[in-house]
Image: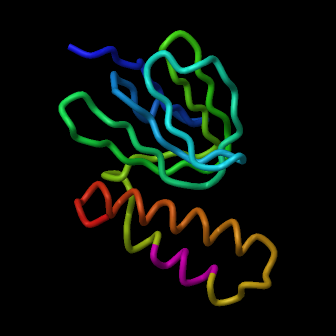
């Protein structure tokens, strides 16, 4: 059995995902990052994007995060996001409508961030469904 990470994704409302994995990948303000066992301790700011938990059996669990931070210490990864949901929880029609609204008026305040959030949600949902 290989060494594993203990990972937890929480939002302001609830624990979204918790478990053991071989790697966590997501996006920070510095770019895409992959955390594996024995990673150096670190703290990073998250941006809107997909987060992937790579499981020991080869499966992947996908979610979407919006803002927050990621902390790594002693083979533990804690992700505290402003908003987070797993791919199987995402209402695809609602995310598509949010993307369309954001793209209708790209100069509107907040439309760029709304577009990134909607794309992250759609990516997580597509990967969950095996389409990504």
Q: Residue furthest top?
A: 74
Which colour style is shown? rainbow
Name the side, left or right, on which 110 lies relative to 121. Answer: right
Across and down, in percent, residue 53 comes to: 38, 37
| Residue at (21% x, 37% y) in the render | 58
58 left or right of 6? left
Say if 4 sits above or below 127 in the image. Answer: above
State left or right for residue 86 relative to residue 50: left
Q: Position of residue 47 (x, y in %)?
A: 66, 50
* Residue at screen point 49% across, 79% down: 97
Q: Is residue 18 left or right of residue 77?
A: left
Start-end of magenta stretch: 96-102
In which quadrant is the C terminus drawn? bottom left
- Which quarter of the rendering shows the N terminus? top left
Q: Position of residue 3 (x, y in %)?
A: 33, 14
User: Residue 63, image x and y in percent?
Assistant: 42, 48
């Amino acid at each position: 059995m290989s060494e594993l990470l203990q990972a937890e994704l929480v939002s302001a409302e609830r624990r979204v995902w918790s478990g053991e994995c071989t790697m966590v990948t997501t996006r920070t303000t510095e770019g895409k990052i992959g955390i594996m066992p024995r990673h150096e301790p670190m703290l990073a700011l998250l941006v809107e994007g997909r987060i992937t938990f790579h499981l020991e059996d080869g499966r992947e669990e996908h979610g979407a995060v919006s803002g927050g931070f990621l902390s790594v210490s002693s083979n533990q990864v804690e992700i505290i996001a402003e908003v987070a949901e797993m791919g199987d929880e995402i209402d695809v029609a609602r995310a598509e409508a949010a993307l369309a609204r954001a793209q209708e008026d790209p100069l509107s305040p907040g439309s760029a961030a709304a577009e990134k959030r909607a794309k992250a949600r759609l990516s997580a949902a597509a990967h969950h469904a095996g389409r990504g």
